[in-house]
Amino acid sequence: MPEPRATTAPQPLKGLRVIEFTHMVMGPTCGMVLADLGAEVIKIEPIDGDRTRGLLGAGAGFFPMFNRNKKSIGIDLHQGEGAALARRLCASADVVAENFKPGTMEKYGLDYASLSEGNPKLIYATCKGFLPGPYDHRTALDEVVQMMGGLAYMTGRPGDPLRAGTSVNDIMGGLFAAIGVLGALIQRGITGRGMEVQSALYENNVFLMGQHMLQYAVTGKPAAPLPARDNPWAVYDVFTVKDGEQIFLAAVSDAQWLKFCDVLGFPDLKSEPDYATNNQRVLQRPRLLAVLRERLRDRGAAELASLMEQAGLPFAPIRRPEDLYDDEHLLATGGLADVRLPDGPKAGETVKTTLLPFTLGGERLGVRLDPPALGAHSQELLRSVGLADAEIAALKAKAVVA
C-alpha cells in the first residue's frame, strides 16, 4: 500500500471520510478539493478501473490531475455482493459524491434517499449536467453547455462560436459542489443532519454568463463576443513583435497612458491632442493601434516586458501550457508539486502538477498521496469496515473487488 507523504500544511477536513463514485473531471474535482483539504477520499472505481486512466490526447491529464490525495478500490457494482459492499462503505462515510447520469445510483441503492435512511448525517454531493428540470434528461458535456449557455458565443469571433481552452464548467462545477459540501458540513454541525448538494454544468455556465446578462439588463445592449467587444480602453491588446513573438500590453488610465509613452519612447503620441484622454483614444483606437503595431514590431518581447514591469504597467507574455513548468513565480512559491503517474506509458514516472490556488496558514495544500493505482487501498479499506482477510480474498477471487 502506498505510504502518504508527511505534510505540515493545515488539514481542516482530516478525519472526514468521503466515498466518491466519479469519473471524467467534474466529480473528481469535487473529491480532489475535499482530499486536498485533508479528507480521506475513497475512489470507488469499476472493476477494470476508471476509464480516464487510459484516455489519450486532451484527456491524458485527467486522471493524474484530479485524483491525487485519494485512495482507490475497484468494485463491480453489477454484482449484488459488490453493490452491497459499496453500500457498506457508504455507511461509514460523512460524504458521498457522484457524477453519473440520472438514475444510475438508484439502481444500486446508492442514491441519497436510500443511503440517508440508515445514515441521516450523510452529505450527498451529486454532480450533473443540469439541475432538476426540463433539461435534466439530456447528456451534457462541457462543450455542450458552453454552446447553449453563451460562453462559446462570447469566446469566439462573431459567427464562430469557440469553446474555452480548458474544462471550465467541469472544473468549476466540481468546485461549487465542494463549496456546497463545506456549507452542508457547517449546517450538519448545527442540526446534526446531512443533506443533498446538487451542482450542474449548465447552471455553472449560466453563472459565468451573469455579468453579460446583467450588462444587457442594465444597458439594453447585447454583449458582443469578446473578440469584437466595444473596448473601454484603447491600449488593451495583443501585439506581434520581433521574431513573431506576441505580448499583451495595456494602459487603462490616463496616467498609465502617459507612463506607457514615456517608457516606450513615444513623446509625440503623449502630446497628440487626439490621444489626450482615454475616451478620445478609444474613438481613435484603430488608428492608434496601427501606429503602435508598426512601432513595436521590431522590439523584442523580453525587452518590452522588462520596460512594462519596471514602470508598473499591465503586460503579459503569451504562453502555452507547457511553458508554465518553467515559470519562475510558480517555482518560487511552490505552485507545482510532484506526482507519480499510476498508469499509461509513463507509469511510475514523476511529473509536476498544479495545486489549489490558495494558502492556509501561509502554506499551499500539497500532495499527500499520489494518484492511486487501481485497487491500491482495497485491503486497507475493506478491513476498515470489518471484513477479514479471508473474506477479502474470496471477493477478489470472484472479481467482485480489485
Image (cartoon, grey):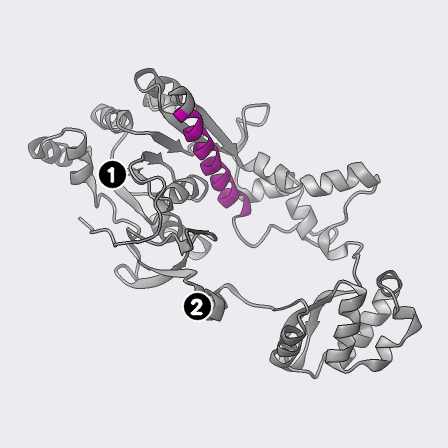
Q: Is residue 85 above or below residue 319?
A: above
Residue 169, percent across and down? 54, 43
Confirm whether residue 256 shows in the render: yes
Query: At 70% from the left edge and 52% from the top edge, which residue is drawn?
Result: 160
151 drawn magenta: no
Query: At 26% from the left edge and 42% from the top edge, which residue is drawn?
Result: 72
Q: Nearer the viewer, residue 132 or 303?
A: 303
Question: Would residue 113 appear left or right of 373 to someone viewing this image?
Answer: right
Q: Which element is circle 2 on?
A: helix
Q: Residues within 10 Å of mark 1 (few under 14, many from 20)?
A: many
Residue 166, percent across and down? 53, 52
Residue span colored magenta? 168-189
Q: Residues within 10 Å of mark 2 (few under 14, many from 20)?
A: few
Query: At 37% from the left edge and 60% from the top edge, which residue is drawn?
Result: 337
According to the picture, the residue beneath numbered tag 2 turns out to be: 332
Question: Would residue 308 appear left or right of 17 to someone viewing this image?
Answer: right
> Of the numbered discs in the image, which one, if any, rests on residue 74?
1
**Image quadrant assignment for residue 291:** bottom right
